[in-house]
Image (tube, rainbow, N blue to C red):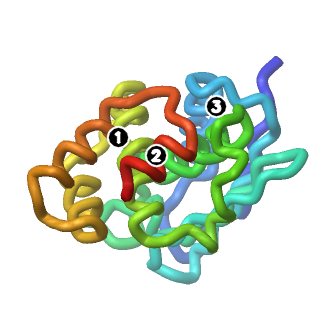
Amino acid sequence: PRMSVTVSPREFKYVSFDAAIIERVADTLMAALGLDRPVEIVVDETTPLTRIDVEIDDAVRIRAQSGAFEDTRHPRQQSEDATAVSLGRVLLRARDRLSGGFGEAPADDELSLPQVAAWNAYVAGRLHRLGVPVHQQRFRYDFRNRHGFTDVVDLAFDRLWSSDGLTWGELDEISR
């Protein structure tokens, strides 16, 4: 049985977003990732910032600032690609935490910036292989900014980008 996706608000006042598109994108990602919990997505349309947070309990609860789903070339307009990348990142991280291997990972707000960049690289590579339009260079640049601009750092990024099934310990070791 498919798990439910709920999006609020249902009608947006400040941005030209469509709750049905957000639901469809989340539903498609959940099916591809094998997530078996309800997903609740709350969009704060009053800020153009891009922060997106997730809490996991009996449901996966996502709080997104509207900039996370916005078309960077058209302010206050929704981008289906940006919606897929932003939701995919937090849903994959939630799946990592739920499916084992990441049980010892610190809480999101306790992760170091290099750890966040490493996990984002690992997540983005898997999203890319699922067909989500991820810009590798964006994640490579973020990784380099947190780890350095060297050939060794690029090899570490490439390993994260192309991996599946890493544990938190393996990811953290690559990040170091």
- Residue 156 seen anywhere in this rendered image of the structure: yes
Q: Which mark is residue 30?
A: 3
Residue 169 percent coordinates (x, y): 55, 45
- Residue 11 seen anywhere in this rendered image of the structure: no
Nearer the observer, disc 2 or disc 1?
A: 2
- Horizontal relation, residue 88 to residue 104: left or right: left
Asked if the residue under mark 1 is in contact with the one under mark 2, i.e. CB atoms within 8 Å, the reply is yes
Give neighbour class at mark 1: few <14, some 14-19, many 20+ (Cα, 10 Å).
many
Give the residue displayed 59% in from the left and 27% down from the top. 33
Q: Nearer the viewer, residue 27 or 96?
A: 96
Q: CA distance from mark 3 to mark 2?
A: 23 Å
* Amino acid beneath label 2: Leu
Nearer the observer, disc 3 or disc 1?
A: 1
Nearer the observer, disc 3 or disc 2?
A: 2
Residue 60 percent coordinates (x, y): 76, 48
* Residue farthest to the top, as pictured: 1
Q: CA distance from mark 3 to mark 1?
A: 22 Å
Q: Which residue is mark 2?
A: 171
* Secondary structure of the residue carrying numbered label 1: helix
Give the residue displayed 31% in from the left and 31% down from the top. 162
> Which one is earlier in the sequence, the residue at label 3 or at label 2?
3
Give neighbour class at mark 3: few <14, some 14-19, many 20+ (Cα, 10 Å).
many
Q: Is residue 135 above or below residue 4?
A: below
Q: CA distance from mark 2 to mark 1?
A: 7 Å
Assign the N terminus to one quadrant of the image: top right
Quarter of the view holding residue 48: bottom left
Give the residue displayed 56% in from the left and 38% down from the top. 167
Assign the C terminus to one quadrant of the image: bottom left
Q: Which residue is mark 1?
A: 160
* Secondary structure of the residue carrying numbered label 2: helix
